[in-house]
Amino acid sequence: MSYEARSLAPVTDAPTNESYDVVIIGGAIIGSAVAWFLAEHYQFDGSILVVERDMTFTNCSTAHTNSCMRQQFSNPLNVKISQYAAEFVREFKALVGPDDPEVHDVAVEHFGYMYLAADQPFAETLRVNQALQAELGAGTRIYTPDEIKAEYPYYNVDDLICGSHNKVDEGYFDSGSMFDAWRRKARQAGVEYTRGEVVTMERSGDRISSVTLASGRVVACGAVVNAAGPRASTVAAMAGFDLPVEPRKRFTFMVDVAEPLEGSRLPLTIDPSGVHVRPEGTSYMTGCSPNPDPAVDPDDFTMDDDIFEEKIWPALAHRIPAFERLKVATRWAGHYAHNRLDHNVVVGPHPEVDNFVFANGFSGHGLQQSPAIGRGVAERIVFGQYRTLDLSPLGYQRILDAEAFVETAVI
């Protein structure tokens, strides 16, 4: 059967209806994942409105991502979330648009992550994590310094104790194509995207009954999904909730090197210094967390070039001597939606207001976790419970209880 194109629901400057079954606040990767999974769900036939303040998505976290996935986590749930992402990306066209010529396979490069340990405590952490990952079916293995040097001769391994590496379903994936396809297919399924900003909410007892846009337009809703990225705490406060999620600035530099690296393709390397680097075509993408690392305004994208000269370049030149001679081709600042409690996502309904649903605080993991979160939020809205992967340990109750979801593998 030939493909028959369906028209797209509009991108509007004002909602076309007075009420919607689901209003999603934020249309970047998480909001669009929820929109697509919900719109395509076999047991959902309701109306969906996505409210997005910037339809160019120029400054959202999605636009500034390093676009990678890994299974090297220490918590089993995070490993399973990433394994689903790898499965979903691998089958993307078949799942999202098997007959649609505008939906393509998602490009993937499995160069893997390489965590490097220069002290015994972190080496032991890597060994414990590797045992867990292997038990769950991940391909992680521990490398000795000699084994690292044999396969990746460009590394300086003199100060290393071990490395943890996984070449299976870890590395880069084309999240931009995934994002574009989700938005397009969601709109084909009837999801309406509107330019605007939610400024207040009406709460009636244990329900959010409506949201008000900056234009003054009031929109009634059956459920609200907070997918507002670095602005998530502002949205939560409209409903009367405290959410410990804030924008933290992250700097990325694209560099070109004078000497080609001989040996296997560079993995995404997490150096003991905290600097990370990965290949990007014939160039390399590198960055690190600033120190100190304060919360910033979500519109603050000012660069800190000193961090490259003072921390990143010295660490790169030490670990990979060929990087002594390099030049910065481009650089940018983006934001993590940083969860101060435990650096992990908060997902699912509020315990007392169950039509307010969180999908916030990914702390740098949002792209790779978006398939599982989109699926899970859709299940929670449709069924009132998770049906595939139980995400309840990542719920808001732990924020109320101040009980961290423990994850040691945080970059």
Image: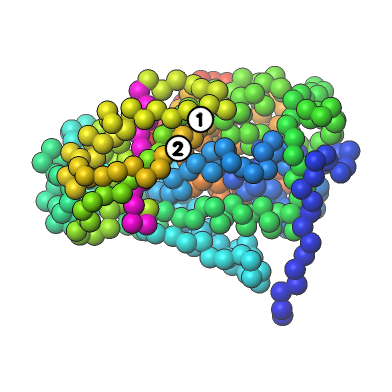
- Residue at image position (42%, 53%) is 172
Choose between 393 and 7: the one closer to the eye: 7
- Residue at image position (88%, 42%) is 17
Identify the mark at residue 57; answer none if there is no mark: none
The residue beneath circle 2 is 332
Q: Quadrant of residue 261?
A: bottom left
Q: Earlier in the sequence, mark 1 or mark 2?
A: 1
- Residue at image position (29%, 43%) is 327
Which image quarter holds the C terminus? top left
The three-letter amino acid code for the residue at tag 2 is: Trp
Classify mark 1: helix, strand or loop: loop
Chain part drawn in magenta: 281-291
Whether residue 174 is visible: yes
Q: Position of residue 89 (x, y in %)?
A: 51, 58
Dot 2: within a 10 Å radius of its alpha carbon, few (fewer than 14), some, or many (20 or more) residues? some
The three-letter amino acid code for the residue at tag 1 is: Phe
Q: Does the magenta-highlighted stretch encompass residue 389?
A: no
Q: Position of residue 247 (x, y in %)?
A: 52, 27
Q: Position of residue 37 (x, y in %)?
A: 66, 52
Dot 1: within a 10 Å radius of its alpha carbon, few (fewer than 14), some, or many (20 or more) residues? some
Choose between 51 and 73: the one closer to the eye: 51
CB atoms at circles 1 and 2 under 8 Å apart? yes
Classify mark 2: helix, strand or loop: strand
Q: Is residue 255 above or below residue 272?
A: below
Alpha carbon distance from label 1 to label 2: 8 Å
The residue beneath circle 1 is 301
Query: Please, which residue is most extreme toward the right here?
Result: 18
Q: How many numbered marks does the figure carry? A: 2
Whether residue 225 is visible: no
Q: Position of residue 343 (x, y in %)?
A: 46, 30
